[in-house]
Image (spheres, rainbow, N blue to C red):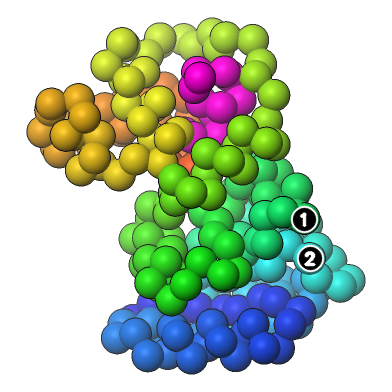
């Protein structure tokens, strides 16, 4: 059973999320929080597997709440929820340790997928959101210098991840097996010290690897 904490200052949003997630087998909503301070306190009290974290909340915004929880010895998996057009803190939240993000109007299927991906140790990367968001919130830095450079094929995989492709889509595009894609992703994560797909995507945009 995957346990979830809902952190959002809008009660209607929390109610909608609870109804969607509670109807999904294997997911249990164990608590709610209406402020950032309450979100941190409730997460530490309830120890949920996943926290759906709003960005705009009173007392403490989602970015600071994420940083606070990620500093804990065993932090929950945090998925940032945003309205995108007004929230420009999402990139910072991802860099602070959040494992994914979605729009509030993303729909039931994507909400469930985001929770399941986070619980499985992966991250939801939606092409319609990730590419636009990271393009908007990052400026290309100098080309990265790594102790062990990425191979040409690993770079291909990184660019595909940054464009929001799934593992199956990457395998089809590069004419390789799914296991090969997973191997490349594991190598990339080790080389650039990324914790998940979102950080790989953020790293690629940050260093200007995606045109």
Looking at the image, do the residues carrying marks 2 and 1 touch, with CB atoms under 8 Å apart?
yes
Residue 14 location (% of width, % of height): 62, 84
Residue 64 location (% of width, % of height): 78, 57
Measured along the vertical axis of the image, is residue 205 above or below residue 39?
Answer: above
Give the residue pinned by disc 1.
86
* Nearest to the observer: residue 126 or residue 57: 126
Q: Residue at x 67, y 55 (%)?
A: 84
Q: Would you call the spot at circle 1 few (<14 residues within 10 Å), some (14-19), or many (20 or more)?
A: few
Q: Is residue 203 magenta?
A: yes
Measured along the vertical axis of the image, is residue 62 above or below residue 187?
Answer: below
Q: Residue at x 57, y 18 (%)?
A: 208
Identify the image quadrant of residue 82.
bottom right
Horizontal side of 189 relative to 181 (left or right) equals right
Name the image quarter holding the N terminus: bottom left
Give the residue pinned by disc 2.
56
Main secondary structure along the magenta-highlighted residues: helix
Horizontal side of 59 relative to 107 (left or right) equals right
Label 2 vs label 1: CA separation? 10 Å
Q: Is residue 138 magenta?
A: no
Q: Would you call the spot at circle 2 few (<14 residues within 10 Å), some (14-19), or many (20 or more)?
A: many
Mark 2 element type: loop
Identify the magenta region: 199-211
Residue 193 location (% of width, % of height): 48, 30
* Nearest to the observer: residue 169 or residue 29: 169
Residue 31 location (% of width, % of height): 59, 87
Mark 1 element type: loop
């Amino acid at each position: 059973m995957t346990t979830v904490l809902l952190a959002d200052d809008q009660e209607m949003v929390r109610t909608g999320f609870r109804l969607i997630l509670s109807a999904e087998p294997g997911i249990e909503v164990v608590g709610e929080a209406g402020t950032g301070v309450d979100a941190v306190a409730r997460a530490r009290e309830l120890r949920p597997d996943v926290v759906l974290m709003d960005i705009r909340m009173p007392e403490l915004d989602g970015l600071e709440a994420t940083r606070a929880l990620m500093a804990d010895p065993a932090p929950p998996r945090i998925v940032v929820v945003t309205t995108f057009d007004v929230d420009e803190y999402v990139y910072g939240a991802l860099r602070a340790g959040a494992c994914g993000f979605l729009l509030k109007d993303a729909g039931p299927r994507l909400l469930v997928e985001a929770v399941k991906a986070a619980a499985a140790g992966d991250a939801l990367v939606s092409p319609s959101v990730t590419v636009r968001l990271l393009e908007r919130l990052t400026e290309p830095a100098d080309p990265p210098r790594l102790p062990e450079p990425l191979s040409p094929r690993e770079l291909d995989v990184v660019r595909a991840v940054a464009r929001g492709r799934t593992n199956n889509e990457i395998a089809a595009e590069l004419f390789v097996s799914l296991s090969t894609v997973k191997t490349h992703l594991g190598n990339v994560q080790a080389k650039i010290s990324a914790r998940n797909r979102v950080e790989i995507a953020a790293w690629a945009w940050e260093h200007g690897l995606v045109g």
